[in-house]
Amino acid sequence: MKKCDIAIIGGGPAGMAAAVSAYDNGVKNILIIERDEGLGGILRQCIHNGFGLHRFGEELTGPEYADRYKKMVLEREIPYIVKTMVLGIEQGENGRHTVTAMNSESGVFTIDAGAVVLAMGCRERSRGQLNIPGERPAGVYTAGTAQRFINIKGEMPGKNVVILGSGDIGLIMARRMTLEGANVKVVCELMPYSGGLNRNIVQCLNDFDIPLRLSHTVSKIHGKERVEGVTVSEVDEHLRVIPEKSEYIECDTLLLSCGLLPENELTKGAGIELDRVTGGATVNQNRRTEQTGVYSCGNVLHVHDLVDYVSEEAELAGKSAAEFVKAGCKEPEYVRRLAVIATGGVRYTVPQRVDVTENPDDIKIYFRVGAVMENVRVRVSCGEKELLLQKKRKVAPGEMEFVRIKGEQLTECDGDITVEIVK
Amino acid sequence: MNIGEKKEMICINCPIGCVVTAEKTADGFIVTGNTCPRGEKYAISELTHPTRTLTTTVRVANREGAYLPVKTSAPISKEKLFDAMKALSTVTVNAPVEQGDVVLPAVCGESDIIATGSIK
């Protein structure tokens, strides 16, 4: 059996940053396990620019951002295996874990690991999950699949395109397909606002005169062998299709950019419960899941807008895993557990709980709101006590926000911490 | 634009996406709403000479089925994006390629096309 101090599942931006951070915090015996052909994760196919402004102070493309971290992994000679699928994680003896994996060279094998960092990323919501009525022709892809076809394989998935969903990947693909010669007819968004960044609406749609129809969805897919067209319909305030306000649009391709879902089969298999809102594990401020020695970070924990925040979170998880290992596979001594409750317009928070030690460090609470709101304040409180009241010019579901809470404030907290939006 | 005329736009420099307003004056523009100096630069360039970074891929001739991601080393004129794509459609590279290598110098008379990935 292979043996390591920290097994990191996934070699994308989260996995690489966690590995580097764990190494720099004093644990060298690490193993990154990646199922694709190389390190880098989804950044390998995100050839557009816009990554790294927070982290590196410059604008990088996806492959460039991934390469920075890959270099850090290689410089430290952190071991990694590729083309290897992890099948399960089980609790072992003395706080350790058994990771079962498989590849074409070794077949099924096990790894004895001290700590485990979950960094598996997320998947796109598929047609089946969206329940779009109609026939089942070829030509319906998630935006990320189309991105892989074009950027990695050099294949165009279609010529006349309708995109459902205005998430960033959908917007990026509208531009990418247009530059490669396709005719992107329209981007439909079910919600009355776009799920993507404003900058992407400007540089991916407006630059190429691609219309964005808000409060519209695809209500039917037509075509027997290949997509021949789609019915685009307006929706009412309850997001129900208005049949009278429907239009047939001829196209050969439908791209779906309708949200990302953390890929947590392994987490569930390990007996860790998931947060119903994020679809990821619930964690404390160190990104520790409900299970001792198992940490989660990046898009497998909750979907991030920016890879820069993924790296930051993964560094925290990597450091926590290193500290766990250095303490002889033991968690720090916690004196109190505080739940972090999302309420009043806040959909979720990460972390979902704070485990307070004798001398707690400052923490950041990340959160996402449920609707677009302007000129509001974020209120963080514990019982009657207000910990923070911060003005926000605008909050939107598409943009993750965060607040900082000082360690000394946590010392005084003895109940649930509430995060809410107030007028 | 006439003097006194205002134009509102969304800055694309970073994910914040500031709504910036540029007002034409006798000797230039007054930019408001930006939260950093790059916003001012963006607004003026958008009204005088809009530019964009182009990212795409080129074929790797000696590696079957392989594509190399590339970008313009600096933003190029917005109206030249499609010309640049056309110029790149016939360009191939030979591995090994290092990130930062020039794949095509001065595309459309503007900035170089450089590799954003490496192929051994």
Image (spheres, coloured by chain):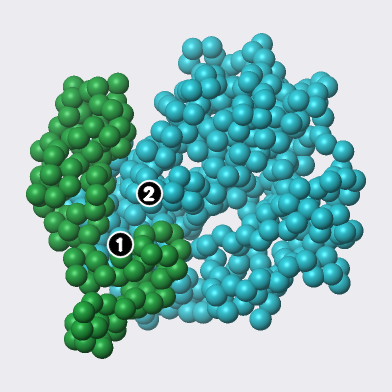
Residue A283 drawn at (x, y percent) = 72, 46
For disc 1, the chain is A
For disc 2, the chain is A
Mark 2 is on which residue type? Answer: Glu
At mark 1, the secondary structure is helix
The cyan chain is A
Left or right? Give the position of A134 relative to B93.
Answer: right
Residue B67 drawn at (x, y percent) = 25, 33
Left or right? Give the position of A315 relative to A113.
Answer: left
Q: Are marks 2 and 1 in contact (CB under 8 Å)?
A: no
Mark nearer the N terminus (2 vs 1)? 2
Crowd tier of the residue under label 2, counting other residues whose Cα lies within 10 Å: few below 14, some 14–19, many 20 or above = some
> Measured along the vertical axis of the image, is residue A5 above or below residue A250?
above
Identify which residue is drawn at 88% across, 45% down: A358
Distance in Å between CA atoms under marks 2 and 1: 15 Å
- Given the current orientation, which residue lies at the most extreme bottom position? B4
- Given the current orientation, which residue lies at the most extreme front position? B27
Identify which residue is drawn at 77% across, 42% down: A290
> Measured along the vertical axis of the image, is residue A181 above or below residue A69?
below
Left or right? Give the position of B80 relative to A170.
Answer: left
Identify which residue is drawn at 23% across, 38% down: B114
Crowd tier of the residue under label 1, counting other residues whose Cα lies within 10 Å: few below 14, some 14–19, many 20 or above = some
> Measured along the vertical axis of the image, is residue A179 above or below residue A230?
above
Q: Report the residue marked by disc 2.
A: A59
The quadrant holding residue B52 is bottom left
> Residue A376 versus residue A344: which sits nearer the camera?
A376
- Residue A89 in view, yes or no: no
Identify which residue is drawn at 76% across, 30% down: A324
The green chain is B
> Measured along the vertical axis of the image, is residue A124 above or below residue A258?
above
Which disc is residue A348 wearing?
none
Which disc is residue A203 wearing?
1
